[in-house]
Amino acid sequence: YFAKTPIGSTGVIGIHAALLPHTSSILYWDRIATPDTALQPGGYQTASSVFDTDTGIAKRTPIKEAPFCSGQTHLLDGRVLVMGGEADDMPWTNDWSESWDKSNRLKDGLKSIQTFDYKTLEWTTLDTQFPAKHWYPTHCVVSDGRVVNVGGWEGVGGTKVMDVEVFDPAINQLIKNHTSISFTEVIDIVNLYPAVLLLPYTDSSNPDDEYLLMYSCIYGELVKLTPDNNFETVFVMPDLPPQAKTFCSSFSALGTSQLLALRHEDNYTAEFMMMGGTSTPRSTVSFNTTNRKLTTTGVSAEENVCACNFPGSMLSARIRLNIVEKKTEATPEGSQIEITTDWEIENMPIQRVAGQMVVLPNGKVVIFNGGQNGFGNDYQKDPVYTPVLYDPYAKAGNRYSVLAASSISRLYHSTAVLVPDGTVVISGQDQGECTGTTFCGTNYAYHYEAEKFTPPFIASGIIRPKIANIITANPLNATQNSVKNIAILGETFDIEYSYDGNLGDVTHVSIVRPAAVTHSIDMSSRVVFVPIVARGQGERSQLLTVKLPEANTRAIVGGAHMIFIMAGDVYSTGKWIHI
C-alpha cells in the first residue's frame, strides 16, 4: 500500500535516482529546463538534491555539468559515478530559462564524467572526458571495479554513438575506447539505455574474463570483456517466440528489465526478465540477417496517428541463462559458450509502457509507474496507478497479482527505489499525458512529491525479523569510513537477530546492492541469496552465520550492500555492510 500522504518534496524532479550507501537518502538529479533549476542564492544553477527518506527533507547539492540523461552506477568505494549527460542548449529550454545569463547555467555534460561522494555530499567533475558525446548511455560495474559504458546518441535527434568505453575508478581515467563493438553495430539506433548486466559466470579456461549480457528491444548478446579491455561476442541470445513478435522492451522508457534474484541453492544461475514495453507497429523492429542490424519499420499513412495512442505491452519475457561450456577442436584452449534454454512469455494483468521493475529482498518483483498506452519517452498517456507483484517462484499462470493503487500519476521520468527500511520510494514525472493527433504534444506536469510504497510482506501489523548486529572479522576505522564492518567474498560473518513472529525461524538471508535508476533501467541493483551455514545463540540474541559466495562466482560485486533476513517472505529492515 501507499502511504496516505507524500513523505516530502525531493527538491528536484526524481528523473535520476541513486540510493546513497550507508544512508536512507536518495541522490536525485534532473535537467536544465525545469522550474527547480532556477538560479540559487550565490548565483549558481543546480539540478541535484539529496532527499532523506526518513525525514522527508531535501538538500540541494551544486553540480557543474548538466547530468540529465547520463548513465549512473555505484563504484566499489561508494561513490556514485555519472558519465555523459545533456547539452546546455537543449531544444526544450523554456522562455524563463532562456533569459538567464548563460555563464550561470550548467555546462554541457555530454562528454563529462562526474562522481558524487556520499560522505561529503559533493559532486566532483573529473579531468578525463569521453572522446564521444553520450546521451542515454548505460554503465555496468564488473567484478574488479572497472566500469563499462555502452550506447547512447549525441543528443536529441542526434547521431547514434557506437563507442564503448572502459573506465578505471582506481585512477579516475578512461583506459579504453572502442569506436564500436558487435553489439552496438547490430542495435544501430536502438541504443538508448540498453540493458548491460554482469553475469555470475566464470570461464574455467579463462577465469579473468568477465561476461556481460547486453540487450536492447529484441536483440541481445553475451559479451566477453578481457583483462586488457577488449570485447568479444560469444553468443547471440535466442530470438523471442512468435507471440512476442511485436514486443520491444529493455530500452529507454519502453520496457523495464533486470536480473531476478540470484540464489545459492541454484548455484547463482542468472535469469533475465523484461516487463512491458510497446507493441505498436510504429516500433516494429526486426533483425536484418544480411547487414546484421536491427531495422525499424515506419508507420503507414493509415497508422499515422499520435504515438501515445499505441497500446503498451501486456507481455513479460523471462529466460534462464543456463550457460554451458563446450570444448571444440577449434578452441582447445578455451570454451564455446551457449545458452540451452528459451524464453518464457507471460501476460501481465495490466498493459504498461515505461514501468520500473524493483526486485525486493525476498526475490519477489514489483513493477511500478508508466502508462497503459504510448511509445516511451515523451509519448505516454493513461497512467498506471497500480503496481503489480510478480512471484518468480510460483507456477506459470499464478505469478502475477495486483497491489494497491497510488493516486499520483508517474509517467515519463519517474523512478522507484528500494530503501533500507524495505519500502520502495516512488518519485518523479515531469511530463503529463501526451495530447494531439499526428503531432503528439506533451503537457508538462512536474511531480516533486515522493511516496513510500509498503510491500504486502512488511505491511503494518506484521511482525518482522530484526537484525541487532552484524559481526565480521574485519572492522574498519569508523573515523575514516561510516562503515562499521567489512565482509570478504568467500568468507563467513555473523548476524545477531531476533524474531517473535509465528513463521518459525529465519529462513533466508539476502544481500542487496543499492539501486541507480532512470528511464526504466537500474544500472546497479542486484539481489543475492546467501547460505546460512550455522545457527547459535549470541550474548543477547540469536545468531546466524552466513557465507558469501566466492569472488570468482561474480554473483556479488564488491562495495556497499544492504543485508536483509527473512522468515518466509517477511523480511527485516536492511543493515549496511561493505563487501
Image (cartoon, helix red, strand yellow):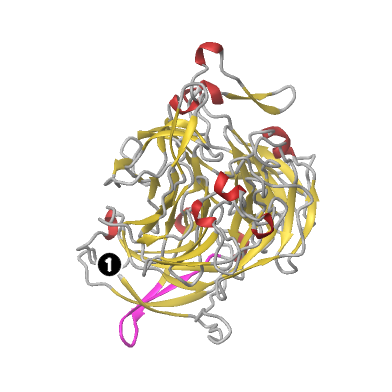
Q: Residues within 10 Å of mark 1 (few under 14, many from 20)?
A: many
Please name the residue shown 60% across and 40% down the image.
215
**Element on which disc 1 rests:** loop
Q: Position of residue 29 (x, y in %)?
A: 54, 57
Q: Position of residue 20 (x, y in %)?
A: 51, 66
Q: Position of residue 30 (x, y in %)?
A: 54, 53
Residue 136 placement, left or right of 447: right
**Residue 131 appears in view:** yes
Q: Quick check: 148 above or below 479?
A: above
Q: Amino acid at mark 1?
A: Arg
Q: For the C terminus, give its image quadrant.
A: bottom right
Residue 109 placement, left or right of 497: right
- Say which quarter of the image contains residue 417: bottom left
Q: Is residue 546 magenta?
A: yes
Please name the residue shown 65% across and 51% down the image.
85
Residue farthest along the top direction in this orientation: 302
Please name the residue shown 70% across and 48% down the image.
224
Identify the residue position indicated by label 1 in the image. Answer: 464
Q: Quick check: 180 above or below 84?
A: above
Residue 437 placement, left or right of 393: right
Q: Nearer the viewer, residue 149 or 104?
A: 104
Label tally:
1
Which is the main secondary structure of the residues drawn in magenta?
strand
Q: Position of residue 347 (x, y in %)?
A: 38, 32
Q: Nearer the viewer, residue 468 or 5?
A: 5
Q: Nearer the viewer, residue 205 or 349?
A: 349
**Residue 269 appears in view:** no
Q: Is residue 31 magenta?
A: no
Please name the residue shown 50% across and 58% down the image.
515
Q: Nearer the viewer, residue 86 or 256?
A: 86
User: Which region of the structure is painted magenta?
Assistant: 534-549
Q: Quick check: 308 above or below 538?
A: above
